[in-house]
Image (tube, rainbow, N blue to C red):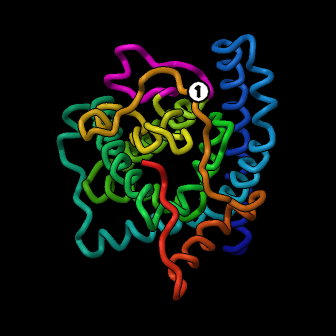
Amino acid sequence: MSPILHFLAEDARGLWQSLLALSLAGVFFAGLARLAKPATWIADGKAALGETRINAVLSVVDQLTVTPALALFMAWLGTRLRAHGLQLEAPAIWATIGPAPTLLATVFVGDFIGYWRHRAQHSRWLWPAHAIHHSDTQLTWFSLERMHPIDRLGSAFDTVILAALGFPFWAQVGNVFVRHYYGYFIHADVPWTYGRGSWIFNTPVMHRWHHAREVTGSGSNFATVFSLFDRAFGTFHQPGPCDAPLGVGEAMGKGAVGQYLHPFRTWWMQIRPGRAGTILPAE
């Protein structure tokens, strides 16, 4: 088999595995919604169908193009880091403390890196791409799939830093798995705050405030797993259940194509001669 055909076959296999994983996640979160909101879960699901279709298109395109491209880029970058001596060797401490503490440390550090990366995505020049993720007005677990390719590239920054710091490869993979699936959970439409547990962990209600449209709290709650970081750096906001409208105030364009083109249109308007100002996220 030629290299190109091999790559396409692997790409198709990866898409099938991703669709299977998404299907299983869909069943799980449907059951979760049935448990958390027995009176409204069906109506809420129907209300989200329109935007779910856009999320599905973005997800499939991502799996066919962006994910393989990122995998190749990460492999190339790892080779370059090692070639220039910029990647630390895995410290002996990981073998000493064992797998569970190693994974916990990797997720904790990865979430710390992700916290600051996420705050950067809400800055002037990165927001137009990140706004795509925030444009879903019916937030569900599947809203995590609504992401622009440029925004996805930014998310890969977390793993690059973990690799450079010398965390074991298997723990880096575990970090991606834990934070990705916990990301599904905090996007889920369930009214859970964890009580005192929110002092440590991010919650679905906490993240719902992050997606609120231009209200107090929409510039807060940047961590994925640990709310400790938002508390420590003054960006925690969870006054109670979030009933504020979700989404963004700016026009995103129509359908999946409009979502892909939005950041490029916005950046062009920002740099055009004679144009001033920018569209910023609510803080």
Could you tell me which residue is drawn at 52 percent across and 76 percent down?
270
Residue 248 shows up from this direction? yes
Residue drawn at (61%, 39%), measured in percent from left and top?
A: 246
Where residue 233 appears, x then y in whole percent?
25, 41
Q: Is residue 220 left or right of residue 142?
A: left
The stretch drawn in magenta includes residue 139 = no
Residue 190 included in the magenta stretch of the image: yes
In this rendering, is residue 240 above or below 118?
above
Q: Is residue 10 visible?
A: no
10 Å crowding of disc 1: few (<14), some (14-19), many (20+)? few
Position of residue 250 measured from the top left corner of the image (x, y, whole percent): 62, 57
**Residue 254 placed where, x, y %?**
77, 59
Q: Nearer the viewer, residue 42 or 218?
A: 218
x and y, in percent, of residue 200 in the image: 32, 25
Q: Which kind of residue does numbered mark 1 sit on?
A: Asp
Q: Is residue 144 left or right of residue 24?
A: left
**Which residue lies at the image location 38% right of the left edge and 48% below the top edge?**
114
Q: Nearer the viewer, residue 142 or 122?
A: 122
The answer to which quarter of the image holds residue 217 is: top left
Q: Is residue 176 above or below residue 87?
A: above
Q: Nearer the viewer, residue 70 or 114?
A: 114
At x 52% / y 59%, what residue is drawn? 151
The quadrant holding residue 5 is: bottom right
Q: Which residues are magenta?
A: 189-205
Report which residue position mark 1 lands on.
Answer: 243
